[in-house]
Image (tube, grey):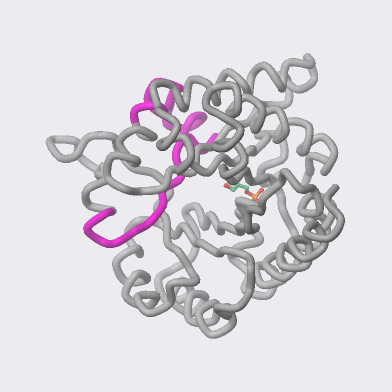
């Protein structure tokens, strides 16, 4: 059975002092006995400092929010997978809707980044999700399926197995609107079955698929009870220590419950 996973995507938030403070608090509260895996994705300029703070805390993994697919070169302002690897960063968010929307990343870029992350031993957190118009037109499933297929194009089974997928409907990000547990589960089940079609059930059983979009401790209970929803990619609520810990607690409880009564 897959463990639950809660990842905090801090986006472009927090000053260095607040970032360090949050990490110190997390470090002293997250035990090694809990089943839920935890990761944070701070702004890249803080990665080195925070990696140092967390170097003896393997139960909190660290990810970047983006990277370029090239190893090095004249690409002003970009961060390469090799540089992330040098810092011992373990994961990287790829194709977040804000990157697609504000920085024009397309499925081809996303696919190149996923491949490059894997080549350098980084776990890609591949983000997919539809906007409101697409959902209202009844095209959400097809749209997300296509993003997924394009994102994992050309990967073999052992590569697909290493990816984390995050389903983040754009209309639910930072809006306070939440995609219901039932609706999120429907898309996430489709994602798992698409992965199965592209690889095998052995692989699709291993891949973690997260939900993201206005996740808070008062709405996430519904989502996390579903066996196929392996956790959350959390924006705003990950900046608040108490909220983030509550989400981890919810995931721990859900894991214990699904072991005895799968939904
Ligand atoms: P919010 O939780 O702030 O809606 O952000 C979700 C998200 O984009 C995480 O990657």
Taking the spot 67% from the left edge, 67% from the top edge, the residue there is: 248
Q: Is 90 one of the magenta-colored residues?
A: yes
In the image, residue 165 lies at what x, y percent?
Answer: 56, 40
Q: Position of residue 146 (x, y in %)?
A: 58, 18
Which residue: 33% across, 42% down? 67
Image quarter of residue 87: bottom left
Please identify the quarter of the rendering in which residue 201 is found: top right
Q: Nearer the viewer, residue 234 or 176?
A: 234
In this view, the residue in front, 221 or 132, is 221
Q: As drawn, is 143 to the left or to the right of 8?
A: right
The mark tally for this picture is: 0
Which quarter of the rendered picture does the N terminus lie within?
bottom right
- Image quarter of residue 234: bottom right
Whether residue 139 is situated above or below residue 9 in the rendered picture:
above
**Is 213 contained in the magenta span?**
no
Write the residue at 78% across / 67% down: 253
From the viewer's perspective, tell me whether residue 62 is left or right of residue 33. Answer: left
Relative placement, left or right, of 187 versus 96 is right
Q: Up-down: is 61 above or below 74?
A: below
Q: Magenta part of the protein: which range?
A: 85-112
| Place of residue 261 in the rendered image (x, y in percent of width and height, measured from the top left) | 86, 56
Question: Which residue is pictured at 49% across the width and 71% down the height?
Answer: 59
């Amino acid at each position: 059975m897959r463990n639950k996973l809660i990842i905090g995507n801090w986006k472009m938030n927090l000053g260095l002092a607040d970032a360090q403070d949050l990490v110190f608090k997390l470090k002293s509260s997250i035990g090694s006995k809990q089943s839920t895996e935890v990761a944070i994705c701070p702004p890249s300029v803080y990665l080195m400092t925070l990696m140092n703070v967390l170097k003896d805390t393997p139960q909190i993994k660290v990810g970047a929010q983006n990277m370029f697919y090239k190893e090095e070169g004249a690409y002003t302002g970009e961060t390469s997978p090799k540089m992330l690897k040098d810092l011992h960063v373990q994961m990287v968010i790829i194709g977040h809707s804000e990157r697609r929307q504000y920085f024009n990343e397309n499925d081809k870029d996303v696919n190149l980044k996923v491949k490059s992350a894997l080549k350098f031993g980084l776990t890609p957190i591949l983000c997919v999700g539809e906007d409101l118009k697409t959902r209202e037109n009844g095209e959400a499933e097809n749209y997300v399926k296509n993003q997924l297929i394009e994102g994992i194009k050309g990967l073999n089974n052992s590569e697909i197995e290493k990816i984390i997928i995050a389903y983040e409907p754009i209309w639910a990000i930072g809006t306070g609107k939440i995609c219901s547990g039932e609706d999120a589960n429907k898309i996430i089940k489709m994602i798992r079955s698409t992965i199965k079609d592209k690889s095998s059930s052995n692989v699709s059983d291993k891949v973690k698929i997260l939900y993201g979009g206005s996740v808070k401790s008062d709405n996430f209970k519904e989502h996390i009870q579903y066996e196929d929803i392996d956790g959350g990619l959390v924006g705003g609520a990950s900046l608040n220590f108490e909220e983030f810990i509550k989400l981890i607690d919810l995931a721990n409880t859900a894991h214990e419950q699904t072991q005895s009564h799968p939904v």
